Image: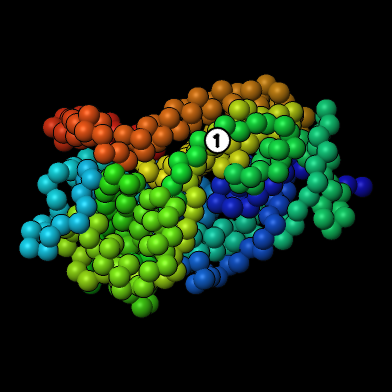
Amino acid sequence: MSKHYDLCINGGGPIGSTLACLVARQGRRVLLLERNPFVTEPLSSLDGRAYALAEGVIPLLEQAGIWAQLPRPAEAIRAIHVLDGQGPLPRASRRQIASDGLTFQPEDAPAQRPFGWMVEAYDLLAAIARTVSSHPELDVRAPETGSFDFREDRVDITLSSGEKASASLVVAADGRRSALRQQAGIGVQVTPFHKHALVAAMAHKKPHHGSALENFLPQGPFARLPLPASDRHPHRSAIVWTDTPQRIKHFHDMPADAFARLVEERLGGEALGKVTLAGQRWLYPLASQYALRYTAPRLALIGDAAHGLHPVAGQGMNLGFRDVRTLAALLEEAWNEGNGTGRTDLGAPALLARYQRSTRPGNFAMLLACNGMEHLFSTHNPFLRGARQLGLKALERLPGLRRSFVQQAMGL
C-alpha cells in the first residue's frame, strides 16, 4: 500500500524546505522531494552568491530550526546608502559617500534592529540540509522526482524510484519554470527587462561596518551588500550589477584587475580601499513574472513558482518567505479547527482560496513597485530623475515616512 501524507512539497530550496520544516513541526506528515542531493557542508564552488534576507524573515527561519544550523554567522545590514546615478568620480574629488543620495541609519529601524542579513548561498543550503533530517514527521527524498495525478480527494504520487504515495495537498516550490504549475495549466505573465545581472564576491582593504549600497545608475542599479569574513578575506562584499546583456558580458569577460577598478568607480566614494575579485562572476537574465493563479485543485504555488521580481529591492526571496508564513499559518489553523483528528482536509478548496486571497494581491503590489523602481531609476529622462530626487529628499526630511518605508522593507 502507498503511504499517505498530509502534504507533499515539490522542491527543497530555501522556500520549500522552510515550509516543510514548519509544517512537520506542527505534527503533520510531510513528503519533501528535491531533485538535487542535500549537502550538509558548505560548497566553495557556490562562492559569490548570497541571499539578502529581511529582518522579518529571521523569526520564521528560527522557528523552522534552520537559522541555528548556519555553519557561519550571517552578516547584519545596519546601514543602507542610496545614491541616485552616481557614476565614476574623479579620484581627486572622491568623498566618503556622494552627497546626492540618502542614508538609512540604524535609528531608522524599529528598536535599531538590523535591516536584514546577508547569508551566503552555500551556508543557507548547508543549514537546510542539516535541519530537514531532524524532523521525524518529515520524509525527505533527495535526489528524487515524482509524477503527480491530481484527483478529487487526493493526489497520487509516483516517485522516480517507482514507489507510490499520496497526499491531501501538493505545494509547488519548484522554481520559475515550475513543472507543476505547467501541468496545472496556470499561465504566467512575464515582463522581460532586456537586462542581465552580474553577481560576484569582492574583497576590499577596509571594513564595510555592516553597510550596504544601492547606486541607481542610468543603465541599471548597482548594489554592494556586506558579507561575513572568509578564511582568505577579512573584508568582503557581494555585488549585484545590472546592465544591458552586451555590457554585462563584457564586464564578465574582462580581466579581474580591470573589473575590480570598474567596481570601485561605482561605489560612490565609499571608503573601502583597494577592491579585488574574490570568486567567480555569475550572470543572470532579468525578468519579472507572475502566475495568473496561485492555486489549482489540491495544488498551491509558493516562491518563484508563483512570482519572480526584479532584484532592485532585494525582495524576491523575502516575498517567497511571506508565502511560507501565510500558508503554514493557514494549514495549522485548519488542522486545529479539526481538533487534530486527521479528518481535516488540508487540500480543501476553501483553504486554497484563502491562501490566494491572502497572498496574491500584496505580492502583485510588490511586483508593480519593483518594476516601477526599475523604470524610474534606470533612465536618463530628466523629468523622472527630478521625480525620484524629490522622493529621496522626502524620505530624508520626513523621519516618520522613512521609518514606515523601512518597516515595510524589513517585512515587519
Task: Count numbered badges in the picture.
Answer: 1
User: From the viewer's perspective, is residue 96 above or below residue 321?
Assistant: below
* Residue 334 % position (x, y): 65, 28
Q: Tell me what residue is drawn at x 29 percent, y 44 percent.
A: 218
Q: Which residue is mark 1?
A: 190
**Residue neighbourhood size for the residue with mark 1, other residues' Cα within 10 Å, grouped as few (<14), some (14–19), many (≥20):** few
| Mark 1 secondary-structure assignment | strand
Q: Nearer the viewer, residue 407 or 150?
A: 150
Q: Tell me what residue is drawn at x 31 percent, y 59 percent.
A: 226
> Which quadrant of the figure has residue 349?
top right
* Residue 101 % position (x, y): 18, 43
Q: Nearer the viewer, residue 169 or 207?
A: 207
> Which quadrant of the figure has residue 313?
top left
- Tell whether 254 sits left or right of 268: right
- Tell whether 246 sits left or right of 182: left
Residue extending farthest to the bottom is 232
Residue extending farthest to the right is 1
Image quadrant for the C terminus?
top left
User: From the viewer's perspective, is residue 261 above or below residue 196?
Assistant: below
Q: Tell me what residue is drawn at x 80 percent, y 42 percent.
A: 148
